[in-house]
Image: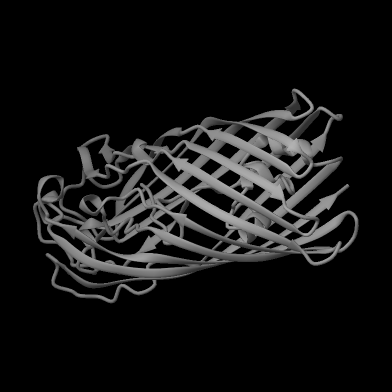
Amino acid sequence: MTAGTAHSAGFLLREQSAAGMGNAFAGATAGAEDGSYSFYNPAGIIRQYGTQASVNATAIIGDAKGYNATGNRKHQNQMDHIVDKKVLPSVAVTHALNSRASMGLSLSAPFGLVTDYSPTWVGANHGTLSELSTYNLTPMFAYRATCNLTLGAGLVVQYIDATLKSGIMQNMTGGHLPNDIVAKMTGNDTSLGYIVGGLYEFSPRTRVGVSYRSEVKHKLKGKIRFNHQVPMADIENQSIDASVKTPALLTFGAYHDITRKWSVMAEAQKTYWSSFDNLIINGHKSGVLSYTEENWKDVWFFALGTSYKVNKDLKLRFGVAYDVTPVSDAYRTPRIPDSDRTWFTTGAEYKLTDKLSLNAGYAYIRAKKNRVNLAGTGYDADRGPLTAQYKGNIHLFAGGLNYRF
C-alpha cells in the first residue's frame, strides 16, 4: 500500500518550501529564512520574529515512461505518463513568545504520489496503481538555551491513506477471469512520531543545524474489492491490513553569508529506508493476499546552493543536488521503479512590503535510466516474470507567501 514517485528517492517528497526549493534545499536545516523551513528543523523558528505565516504550494509535472516491457500477459500497452500531475500544499505559522522561546504549527505532505498503468499492461499482476498520501500536523517549540544554541522539538501527527490496484493471479480464484480484472485495496491510519533539532549560530553570518525526524509506524486497515465478480466470494469485500513505516530522517545543514550580497549553503540528509523491508497485505478471511520483498537500503541526499541579493527587495537562488535511490536492481518493481536523481534548481524572493514577501522556485530533476528484471520466482511466482525499462524527468514549480502580522 505504497506509491512510487518519479521525483524523489523512494516516496519522500521535498516540496515543503518554495524558498528552499530555489537552493535545492541546501541549508534548509540551518537557513530558517521563513516559517516553511520549520519542516526541516523546529529550532529554526526562533529566528522568526513576532507572528508569521508561510503558505506554499508545489505543482509536480512529470514525464516518466516505461518501455520494452515483457511479461506473462498477452497485451502490450504503452507505459507513458505513469506519474500523475499533483499539487502539494504546506502551511506553517510561528509565534515568538519572547526573546528566548517560540512556538509553531505546520501542515505538510512529506510522502506520496502515484504510479499508474493500464489495467491490461503486461505487468498488471505486479501492479497497476499505487497511490499514497500522507499529511503531517506538527506543533513545535523552540528554546534559546544559550546566546548561540537553540533547541527545538515537535510532535508529528501523521495520517496516511493508500490505494493499491493489481491484476489477479489466475490461481488466486481457481477460475477463468476477464483480462482487465483488477483488485483494489484501500487502507488508512493515523500514528505519531516526533522531530527534534538544534541550531548553532557562530555569528550573525554563519550557522549550522541538525535535526532528526523519527520513523512513524502505521497499521493500515481497509477493504479489498474487484471490478468483476470472482469465483471465491470470501476473498472479495473482506477486511485487510498492512504494516507500513515512513522512514526516519537525519539531516545536517550549514549556512554562511560570504558578503552582504552572496550566501552559500549545504545540506546532507540520511533517510533510513531500511525500515521498508517488505510489504505484506493480510486478508482477515484468507490470510496473506500479497507478499513483496522490498529490502530497501539507507541512502543520502546531498545539496549545494547559493543566493544573491540584487537589492534590498529581490533575492535570487540557485542550487544543485544528488538524490540516491534506496532500491537495488535485484528488488526494483514497477510499483516503485526508482533510480538516482540529479536536481537543478533556481528561485527568487521579492519583498512587496515590510510584512509581505513572495517566493518562487523551480526544479528540474533528471532521473537515471533503470530497468525492472523480475524472474517470477519465490514470492513473485504467482505474478510471473517481468522485464521493463524506465526513463523520466520531473518539473517542479513552487510558490510561497510569507506574512508577518
Q: Position of residue 193 (x, y in %)?
A: 53, 30
Residue occupying image coordinates x 24% and y 54%: 329
Q: How is the image coloured?
A: one colour
Q: Which of 241 and 91 is in front in this view?
A: 91
Residue occupying image coordinates x 75% and y 32%: 103
For residue 121, above or below residue 340:
below
Q: Residue furthest top?
A: 145
Q: Position of residue 131 (x, y in %)?
A: 41, 54
Give the quadrant of residue 334.
bottom left
Q: Which of 308 and 285 is in front in this view?
A: 308
For residue 51, above or below residue 113:
above
Residue occupying image coordinates x 30% and y 68%: 390
Q: Which residue lies furthest to the front in this view?
A: 258
Q: Nearer the viewer, residue 347 or 305?
A: 305
Q: Position of residue 282 (x, y in %)?
A: 26, 37
Is residue 82 at least partly visible in the picture?
A: yes
For residue 388, above or below residue 224:
below
Q: Where is residue 325 in the image (x, y as percent from the top left)?
A: 37, 52
Does residue 5 appear to the left or right of 66 in the view shown?
right
Give the quadrant of residue 247.
top left
Is residue 37 at least partly visible in the picture?
A: no
